[in-house]
Image: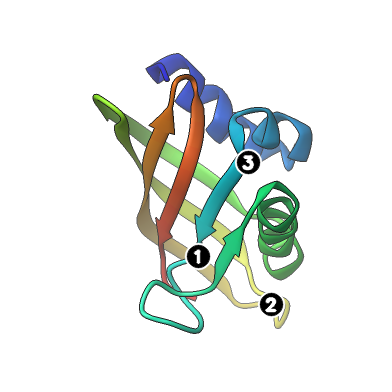
Amino acid sequence: MTLENLEKYLEGWNRHDIDTLMSYMTDDCVFLLGSGKGASGDKFEGYDAVKEGFEQVWKELPDVSFKNARHFLSGDRGCSEWTLTATHPNGSKIEQDGCDLFTFVGDKIKNSYVKRRK
């Protein structure tokens, strides 16, 4: 994985471009939402489930975007820090800082754990 690819991955989130996002994921990827059931929040395992989990974020926050991103890499791990802005379905606005923690296999994301408030 490269810093440039992490930037492209985040740009995919901002465009709501599921094909771009999934092009960076392994077939056996895992997405941990950070909120929801379980100690690590809602868990999506496998390519199709992760795709569904990503699309769920856009359903819950249709105008979500990530700004002020900073990315870090260390071996097979990485982190993206960002500020999320969005509007809840009830019309209330949110702005919050958060991060994604990644585990990589080559140039693909194996695990993505996002920490954010709901």
- Residue placed most toward the observer, 1 or 59: 1
Q: Nearer the viewer, mark 2 or mark 3?
A: 3
Asked if labels 2 and 1 touch by Cβ distance under 8 angstroms, the answer is no
Mark 3 and mark 1: Cα distance apart in space: 15 Å
Q: How many marks?
A: 3
Mark 1 and mark 2: Cα distance apart in space: 22 Å
What colouring method underlies this structural image?
Answer: rainbow
Tell me residue 92's x, y (percent).
61, 77
Write the residue at 40% across / 16% down.
2
| Horizontal relation, residue 10 to residue 81: left or right | right
Q: Is residue 90 above or below residue 8?
A: below
Write the residue at 37% across / 39% down.
103
Crowdedness near tag 2: few (<14), some (14–19) or many (≥20) residues, C-alpha within 10 Å: few
- Residue placed most toward the observer, 17 or 84: 17
The residue that mark 3 highlights is 13
Amino acid bearing label 2: Gly
Tell me residue 83's x, y (percent).
41, 50
If you read the primary sequence from the N terminus, does the residue marked by circle 1 or circle 2 appear first?
1
Write the residue at 72% across / 64% down.
56
The residue that mark 1 highlights is 33
Residue 91 - label: 2
If you read the primary sequence from the N terminus, does the residue marked by circle 2 or circle 3 appear first?
3
- Residue placed most toward the observer, 95 or 56: 56
Quarter of image, res 28: top right
Amino acid bearing label 3: Trp
Q: Residue furthest left?
A: 74
Crowdedness near tag 1: few (<14), some (14–19) or many (≥20) residues, C-alpha within 10 Å: many
Mark 2 and mark 3: Cα distance apart in space: 21 Å
| Horizontal relation, residue 100 to residue 37: left or right | left
Asked if labels 1 and 3 touch by Cβ distance under 8 angstroms, the answer is no
Tell me residue 34's x, y (percent).
43, 68
Residue 4 - label: none
